[in-house]
Image (cartoon, rainbow, N blue to C red):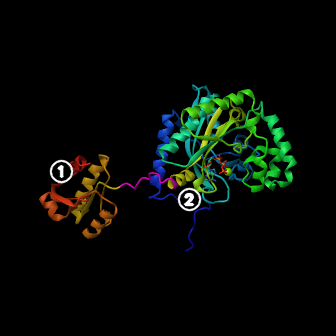
Amino acid sequence: MEKIKKPRGTMDILPGESELWIYVESKMRDVASRFGFSEVRTPTFEELGLFKRGVGDTTDVVQKEMYTFSDRDGTIFALRPEGTASTVRAIIENGRTSDPMPLKYYYIINCFRYEKPQAGRSREFFQFGVEMFGAKNAAADFSVISLADTLLRELGIKGIKLHVNSIGCPECRPAYREKLVQYLTANKESLCDTCKARLEANPLRILDCKNPECKVIAEAAPKSIDHLCGECESHMTTLKAMLDAAGIDYEIDTHIVRGLDYYTRTVFEFICEGIGAQSTVCGGGRYDGLMEQLGGPSQPGIGFGMGITRLLMAMEQSGAYIPEPKKPVLYIASLGERACVEANRITTELRRDGIMAECDVMGRSLKAQMKYADKIGARFVLMVGDSEIESGKATLKDMTNSTQSEIELSAVANHIKNSI
Ligand code: ATP
Ligand code: MG
C-alpha cells in the first residue's frame, strides 16, 4: 500500500532527537523564569483578523504565508504564524493589563507559515518567544536582549552576533520614511518586483531584501538611525551603554528593520553566520503601538522570537553540549514466569523511587536479554531464574567495571538506590 508522508515543510522529532529539544526547552524555561517571565499558552489558531491587525496587512507573513481555513460555520481562522498577536489578544481579553506592570510572558510554540522549505525554514516551525508590556524604558529592551544573550551563552553557542538598529517612532519616522521613499523611487528601476510593490506599502522592508541589486540600493539609502528624534536618540544611547556595561557585543546594523508598522525604536537580531542562508536565530524589537492596535490600552511592548531549529543548527556548529539519551540504572534479565514477576516487582519499586529501571517485556532468551541490556547501556544487570527465586539470591553485575556480586533479591532495590 502507498505510504502516507508528512506534509511538506514539517518535521518529525523522534527519540534520539527529542532529548535535545527537551533539554533546550528546559533551558528556555529556566532562563526565562530567572528573568521573571512566566509562560503563556494560547490557541494554535485564531481568527484571521487578529493576524491581519496584529502582524500587519502589508507583511509577507499575512499576504503570502498564512495558513487559513474556514470553520463549519464560516468563520475564517488562521494557524498562528507567530506568537505576539495571540499573546496581546490574551492579555487584553483576560484583563491582564490591570496586573502590576510590567507583564512578562514567554512561550514555546509551533508556528505555521506557507514558505519554501529549505535549511532553517519550514512550514511548521518552533519558536521560543518573550514579551514584555508596560515598560517604555531602554532597560526593558536591555533585559529582553540580555535574556536571549544569556540563553545563547548557556547553550554554548559561539559565533553569534547581536545586530541592533533603531527605526524611530511616530514622531520621527514619517519624515524619515518620506526621505527613504524619495530615494527608493529615484532608484525604482533597479529594485526587484517584490520591492517595487513594497515601495508604497512597506518601504522600510526594502532595506532588508536579500536580492543583490536591492542590497546595493539599500546600502546607500538614508538610514533611520540618522533621523531619530531626541527621545529615540537617547533611548538608543542608554541601551548601548547597558549593552557595553554588561559585555554584550553588538553592532549597529541599519538594514535591520522588522518592517511592521507597529515596531518602534529598537529592533534587533542575533545572527549566526555559520548556519547558512537562514542565519537569523532570533529577531525582536519594540512595539509600542501594538496593544492599542489590537483594541487594548496603550502600553509599550518589547519582545523577540527565536527559531528553535536554527538555534539547534547554531549549537551543532558550535560543538555545544548535546544531551545523551537516558540510560537505565538497572536491567533485570529474567527467565521463567516467577522470575518475570519478581523482575517487575523490583523495577516497579525502583521506578516509584524515581530510578530508571528496565526488565524484559519481549520474552527473549537470557543471552538476547544480556545483549539488549548492553545496547541500552544499563549500569547494573541482575539475572533472575527459577533457582534464584528458590534461593532468594541473584547475581548483580556492575557493567562499568564488570564485577559481580551475590545479592538478596529483597535487598536489590535498596542496594541500587544506595549505589547511585
Ligand atoms: P526570516 O527573515 O528568516 O523570514 P522573519 O523575519 O520572517 O525571519 P520572525 O517573524 O521575526 O522571522 O520570526 C522570528 C524567528 O523565527 C526568526 O528569526 C527565525 O529564527 C524563526 N523563523 C521564522 N520563520 C521561520 C520558518 N519558516 N522556519 C523556521 N524558523 C523560522
Ligand atoms: Mg519570514
> Dot 1 lies on which element?
helix
- Residue furthest toward the bottom? 1
- Locate residue 183 relative to residue 8 in the image: left or right: right
Q: In the image, what residue occupies the spot 58% across and 28% down?
A: 102
Q: Amino acid at mark 1?
A: Ala
Question: Can residue 94 be seen in the rendering of this structure?
Answer: no
- The front one of 282 and 353 is 282
Q: Would you name the residue on which mark 1 appears?
A: 411
Residue 218, above or below 136: below
What residue lies at 42% left-to-right and 52% top-to-bottom?
Answer: 323
Q: How many marks?
A: 2
Gap in angstroms between the C-alphas marked 1 and 2: 46 Å
Q: Quadrant of residue 378?
A: bottom left
Q: Residues within 10 Å of mark 2 (few under 14, many from 20)?
A: few
Magenta region, mostly helix, strand or loop? Answer: loop
In the picture, the disc for residue 11 is 2
The reply to whether the residue tagged 2 has its Cβ within 8 angstroms of ligand 1 is no
Question: Relative to 333, does residue 322 appear above or below in the rendering?
Answer: above
Which is more N-terminal, label 2 or label 1? 2
Which quarter of the figure is the N terminus placed in?
A: bottom right
* The residue stretch that appears in magenta: 317-326
Q: Position of residue 149 (x, y in %)?
A: 54, 41
* Residue mark closest to the camera, 1 vs 2: 2
Where residue 183 appears, x then y in whole percent? Answer: 84, 44
